[in-house]
C-alpha cells in the first residue's frame, strides 16, 4: 500500500494535504543538518537544492518553473530599473500570481480540496518583492543620507501640532526600518535563491528579510562566533509540542465539521442564531488550527536551524549602550533586529550600531532572554482570546502582516499625509488577491478592513473612560467578546469561499458582523469624548 495514502487515511485528509504535511515535517531535519555546514557558498546551495526538491515533491516540477520565472523577471527589473524596481516587482509578480490563479482555477479547485502552488507562490512573491524594495531603498536612502541633515534642521525649526508630530514620528520609524533592510549591492543569483528557497519555507512562510538570511549564512551580526549563542532546545521543543497539540485539536474537531450547515441556507436556518454563530466559530477554529500546525513546524525548523534567533533582550537593570543587546526590543516587536549593525555604503548606521559592541554584548548575553520572534508567525492565545480586533491582526500570520505594513501600507501613504480607511482597504485588497480569486476572500478582507477600523473607533469612543476603573474593565471585556464574535463571523466567508455560501453564512447571522462595525465607525465620527486630564506628577 502507498505509505503516503496510508498516512492520509490515518489522519483523515486528502493525499495532497498529507504530502504537504510530510514535506513540512522535513523542514526540521533539513534545518538541523544545515548547522553542520560552515561554508557560506555550500549553505546557499544546500538551501536552494532542498527547497527546490521539496516544492517539486509537493507540487511537481512545474511549480519550480513558476518560481524561476518570477526570479528571472525580478532580476531583470532590478538590473534595468533600480529606481522603481520595488513597485515593478510587486506589480509583476502579483500579476503573474493572478494569472496562475486563473489558469489553475483556484476559485474552483480550492473548494474541492485540490492543492496547487499558488499559496507557495504568494510567499515567494512577498520575499522577492522585499528584496527588490530593499535594493531600491539602498539607492534612495543614500541620497537621503546626504540631504538628511539639512532637511532635519529645517524640520526642527517648524512648530508642529501634536498630530503632525505623531505623523512625523511614524514616518521616521518607517524610514529607519527601510534603512535597516536596505541593500547597497544587488545579491548574487546564488544568494537570492538560497534566501528564497531556504528550508522550503517558501511553501509556508514566514517572511523574513534578506539581511537576516545573509548574516545568518555568513555568521555575522548576532550569529557571530565571537558572541554567545543561545540554546535552541527549549524553544524548539515548545514549538514542536505546540504543533502536536494543535494537530490533536484539529483531528478531534475536523471530523464533525460540515460546511454545508453554513453554506446551505436550508440547513443553516434550521438552527437558532447562537448555534449558527457556533457553527461559524467551529469552522474558523478548524481552519486556524490547521494553520497552527504548519506554523508551529516552521517555527521549530527555524529555531533548530538558528535562523529564528532575533537577539538578546537585556537583563533587568542592565543595558548595552543604553539599549537591549543586539536588537533586543526592536527584534521582539518588528522582526527587524536582524538588520542591526549592517553596513550601508561602507559605514555602520548610527541608529543600528549602538548595540554592536561585542565586549559589552558578551557581558549582557546569557543574563537576558533570547528572542526568537523571527520564527514565530502566530501567537495562539493572542488569536483565540484577543483584547481587540487589532490584537488579532498583530498575532495572526505575523510575518505577512509585517510585510503588508512595510511594503504595501506604509509605501501607499504619501509623505506628510495621514493614512485613512481607503489605504487599509487597498492593503486588504492586495492580501485578498494573494490568497485567491474567490468571492469569500474578497468579502472576508473587505469586512476585515471594517473591523479594524471599528476597533480603532471603540478606542476613540471609550477614550474618555479613566483607566483602572470598573467601567474601563467592563469595556475591555466587551471589546474582547466583540473581537471573538466578529472574527468568527467574517472568517466564515474565508471557510466557505463561494458567494452563495458567504451570503448564507452572513445572512444567517443577520449581517451583525458588518452592521455593528459600521455603526461603531459612524459613532466615532459624531461622538468625540473628552479625554481625562493627565495628572502631572512632580
Image (cartoon, helix red, strand yellow):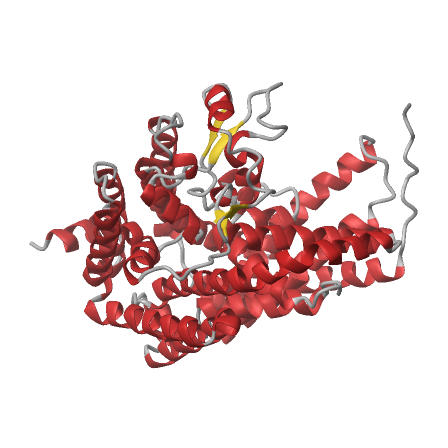
- In terms of depth relative to the viewer, which is nearer, 42 or 343? 343
- Numbered disc total: 0
Q: Residue at x 22, y 72 (%)?
A: 62
| Quadrant where the C terminus is found in the figure | top right
- In terms of depth relative to the viewer, which is nearer, 52 or 343? 343
Q: Is 16 left, or right, of 219 in this rendering? A: left
Residue 386 visible, this angle: yes
Q: Position of residue 317 (x, y in %)?
A: 62, 18
Q: Position of residue 91 (x, y in %)?
A: 48, 75
Q: Is 74 left, or right, of 404 in this rendering? A: left
* Residue 380 drawn above or below residue 100: above
- In terms of depth relative to the viewer, which is nearer, 390 or 132? 132
Q: Position of residue 425 (x, y in %)?
A: 63, 68
| Quadrant where the N terminus is found in the figure | bottom left
Residue 440 visible, this angle: no
Q: Residue at x 42, y 76 (%)?
A: 80
- In terms of depth relative to the viewer, which is nearer, 216 or 332? 216
Q: Residue at x 86, y 36 (%)?
A: 466
Q: Is 36 left, or right, of 272 in this rendering? A: left
State the residue lying farthest toward the left.
Answer: 1
Q: Position of residue 25 (x, y in %)?
A: 26, 45
Amino acid at each position: 500500500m502507498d505509505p503516503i495514502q496510508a498516512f492520509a487515511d490515518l489522519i483523515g485528509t486528502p493525499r495532497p494535504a498529507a504530502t504537504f504535511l510530510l514535506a513540512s515535517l522535513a523542514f526540521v531535519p533539513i534545518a538541523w543538518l544545515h548547522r553542520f555546514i560552515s561554508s557560506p557558498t555550500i549553505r546557499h546551495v544546500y538551501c536552494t537544492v532542498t527547497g527546490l526538491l521539496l516544492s517539486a515533491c509537493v507540487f511537481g516540477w512545474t511549480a519550480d518553473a513558476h518560481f524561476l520565472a518570477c526570479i528571472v523577471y525580478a532580476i531583470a527589473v532590478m538590473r534595468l530599473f533600480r529606481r522603481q524596481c520595488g513597485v515593478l516587482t510587486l506589480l509583476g509578480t502579483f500579476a503573474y500570481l493572478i494569472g496562475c490563479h486563473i489558469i489553475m482555477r483556484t476559485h474552483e479547485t480550492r473548494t474541492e480540496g485540490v492543492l496547487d502552488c499558488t499559496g507557495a507562490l504568494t510567499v515567494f512573491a512577498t520575499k522577492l518583492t522585499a528584496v527588490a524594495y530593499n535594493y531600491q531603498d539602498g539607492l534612495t536612502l543614500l541620497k537621503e543620507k546626504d540631504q538628511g541633515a539639512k532637511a532635519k534642521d529645517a524640520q526642527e525649526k517648524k512648530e508642529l501640532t501634536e498630530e503632525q508630530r505623531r505623523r512625523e514620528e511614524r514616518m521616521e520609524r518607517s524610514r529607519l526600518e527601510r534603512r535597516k533592510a536596505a541593500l547597497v549591492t544587488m545579491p548574487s543569483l546564488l544568494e537570492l535563491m538560497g534566501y528564497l528557497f531556504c528550508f522550503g519555507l517558501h511553501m509556508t512562510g514566514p517572511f523574513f528579510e534578506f539581511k537576516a538570511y545573509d548574516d545568518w549564512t555568513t555568521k555575522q551580526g548576532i550569529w557571530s562566533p565571537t558572541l554567545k549563542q543561545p540554546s535552541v532546545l527549549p524553544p524548539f521543543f515548545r514549538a514542536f509540542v505546540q504543533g502536536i497539540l494543535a494537530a490533536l485539536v484539529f483531528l478531534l474537531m475536523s471530523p464533525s465539521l460540515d460546511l454545508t450547515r453554513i453554506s446551505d441556507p436550508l440547513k443553516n436556518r434550521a438552527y437558532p442564531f447562537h448555534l449558527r454563530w457556533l457553527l461559524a466559530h467551529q469552522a474558523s477554529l478548524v481552519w486556524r488550527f490547521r494553520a497552527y500546525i504548519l506554523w508551529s513546524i516552521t517555527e521549530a525548523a527555524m529555531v533548530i536551524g538558528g535562523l529564528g534567533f532575533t537577539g538578546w533582550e537585556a537583563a533587568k537593570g542592565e543595558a548595552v549602550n543604553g539599549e537591549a543587546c543586539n536588537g533586543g526590543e526592536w527584534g521582539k516587536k518588528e522582526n527587524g533586529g536582524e538588520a542591526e549593525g549592517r553596513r550601508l555604503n561602507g559605514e555602520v548606521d548610527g541608529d543600528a550600531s549602538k548595540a554592536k559592541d561585542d565586549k559589552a554584548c558578551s557581558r549582557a548575553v546569557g543574563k537576558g532572554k533570547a528572542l526568537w520572534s523571527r520564527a514565530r508567525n502566530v501567537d495562539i492565545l493572542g488569536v483565540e482570546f484577543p483584547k481587540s480586533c487589532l490584537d488579532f491582526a498583530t498575532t495572526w500570520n505575523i510575518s505577512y502582516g509585517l510585510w503588508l505594513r512595510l511594503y504595501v501600507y506604509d509605501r501607499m501613504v504619501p509623505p506628510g499625509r495621514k493614512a485613512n480607511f481607503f489605504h487599509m482597504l487597498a492593503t486588504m485588497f492586495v492580501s485578498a488577491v494573494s490568497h485567491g480569486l474567490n468571492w469569500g476572500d474578497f468579502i472576508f478582507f473587505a469586512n476585515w478592513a471594517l473591523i479594524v477600523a471599528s476597533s480603532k473607533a471603540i478606542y476613540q469612543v471609550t477614550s474618555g473612560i479613566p483607566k483602572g476603573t470598573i467601567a474601563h474593565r467592563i469595556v475591555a471585556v466587551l471589546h474582547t467578546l466583540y473581537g471573538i464574535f466578529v472574527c468568527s463571523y467574517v472568517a466564515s466567508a474565508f471557510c466557505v469561499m463561494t458567494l452563495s455560501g458567504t451570503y448564507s453564512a452572513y445572512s444567517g447571522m443577520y449581517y451583525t458582523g458588518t452592521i455593528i462595525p459600521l455603526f461603531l465607525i459612524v459613532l466615532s465620527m459624531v461622538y468625540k469624548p473628552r479625554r481625562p486630564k493627565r495628572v502631572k506628577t512632580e
